[in-house]
Image (spheres, grey):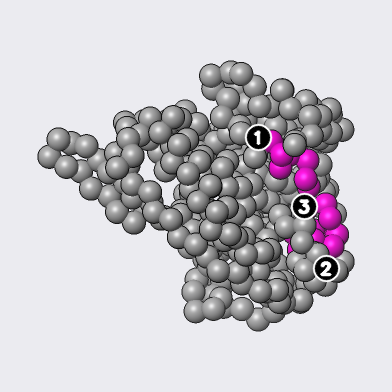
Amino acid sequence: PVASVLELGGVKIARDDVVKDDPTNNVPDTIFSKLGMQLHRRDQHPIGILKNAIFEYFDSNYPQKFDKFDDLCPIVSVKQNFDDVLVPADHVSRSSNDTYYVDPQTVLRCHTSAHQAELLRSGHTHFLVTGDVYRRDSIDSTHYPVFHQMEGVRVFSPNDWEASDLDATSIAAGDLKTCLEGLARHLFGAVEMRWVDTYFPFTNPSFELEIYFKEKWLEVLGCGVMEQEILKRSGKLNNVAWAFGLGLERLAMVLFDIPDIRLFWSNDERFTSQFSKGQLGIKFKPFSKYPPCYKDISFWISESFTENNFCELVRGVAGDLVEEVSLIDNFTNKKEMTSHCYRITYRSMERSLTDDEINDLQWNVREQVQSKLNVVLR
Ligand code: PHE
C-alpha cells in the first residue's frame, strides 16, 4: 500500500495529484512511492554521507559560503525542467518515453538543473541543490528510475576577471575544473582523472569528468560555463557562471563498493547497519549473493513499443526483484514484423526466490505485456 498524502518541501501532495487520470500522465505507483523518501537527507545512508562530504569540501575550500538546498519539491513545471535551461523543443529528453509527466505542464524533475534559473533569479550566486531525480530508462545494476543529483552553481562578477589577461569564460572554466578536480581528490584521494568535451544545451563549453576506477573510465559528472542567455533572463547581464551536476549513486557505488543500485533503497539491516554518519571510507560487505534466475520472453513488437515502457512494466510486476532486462535477440522478418527477445534476470538482494514465485512474476509479465503494450507473444 502506498501512502496517499506526502509532504514535499513543506507542501502537501495527494497521490491523486501525481498519479492521475490524464492521458499524458505516465507516473506509475512504483514511482509515486519513491517521492518523499529523501535518501539524501539521511545522515547514515551512503547518499547522505556522500552529500555531507561534498558540503564539507565546499565549506572548507571556499571563503564564500555556498547556499544549500535539499528540500526543493521534485514536481516541477516543464518550463523549469526544460525551457529555463534552454532544452530545445524537439530534444529527446522531453519525450514521455524519457520523462515522467504528471500532466502536459508538469514533470518529475529529470535533473537538479531544473532549479538553476529560479535560484539565480532570487539572487543566489553560490549554491548547491541536492535532490531525487526521475528518468525512464532500461534496467541493470547501475540504472534505476529514481536517483540523486547535486547541482552546483557559482556566479562571477566583473571584478573576478578584470585584473586578469584571460576572458571571463576562461576564468570560469578554469575555476570550475580546479574546483571539481579538488572535489574528486577530497572524495577519492589520489585518482587518475580526465576531462572530456561534451554538449549540454545549458552550458558552453561543456565537459564531463571521468575517473579511472577498477580498470575503467567512469563518467561522474557533467558541467560547464553557463549559457549567457540563462544569466541574462535571470537579470544577470554582466556576469558569467559555472554549473555542474553530479550523480550521487554513481559516486557512492564507487566509494562504498556498492555493487547494485537497488541496494540504496533497501531497508535490510544487513545493508543499512554498515554505514554511519561521517564515515566515507567504509567498504560495503555483501551479505550474500542469492542465485539469479533467468527468464526469456519473445514477442512481435508494435509500432509504439519502446524498451523503456517494457522495463517499467516489468518493474511494475516484479519491483526490486528484477535485476536486469536485456535484449538478447532482435530480427525483422520478410513481412516487416520485428521480434524482440528479452532476458529478464530476477534476483533478490535479501533472500532466495522460489520457482513458484518467479513463475508467477513471469506469468504476470507475459499477460501484461500483451494487454498493455500491444505486442504479440511468440
Ligand atoms: N543536468 C545535467 C545532467 O543531468 C548535468 C549538468 C548540470 C551539466 C549542470 C552541466 C551543468 O546530465
Q: Is residue 179 above or below residue 85?
A: below
Q: Residue furthest bottom?
A: 190
* Residue 44 highlighted magenta (yes or no): yes
| Residue that label 3 marks | 39
User: Horizontal and vertical percent for residue 242?
Assistant: 64, 50
The magenta span reads 32-52
Within 10 Å of disc 3 (Cα), the crowding (few <14, some 14-19, many 20+) is many
Residue 261 colored in magenta in the image:
no
| Residue under the image location 14 percent in, 35 percent down | 335
The residue at which mark 1 appears reads as 29
Label 1 sits on what residue type? Asp
Q: Earlier in the sequence, mark 1 or mark 3?
A: 1
Q: What residue appears at the point 29 percent right and 42 percent down from the top-left corner?
A: 378
Q: Nearer the viewer, residue 293 or 100?
A: 293
Residue at the top extreme, as displayed? 22
Residue at 76% from the left image edge and 76% from the top image edge: 282
Element at badge 3? Answer: helix
Which numbered disc flags the more N-terminal residue, 3 or 2?
3
Element at badge 1? helix
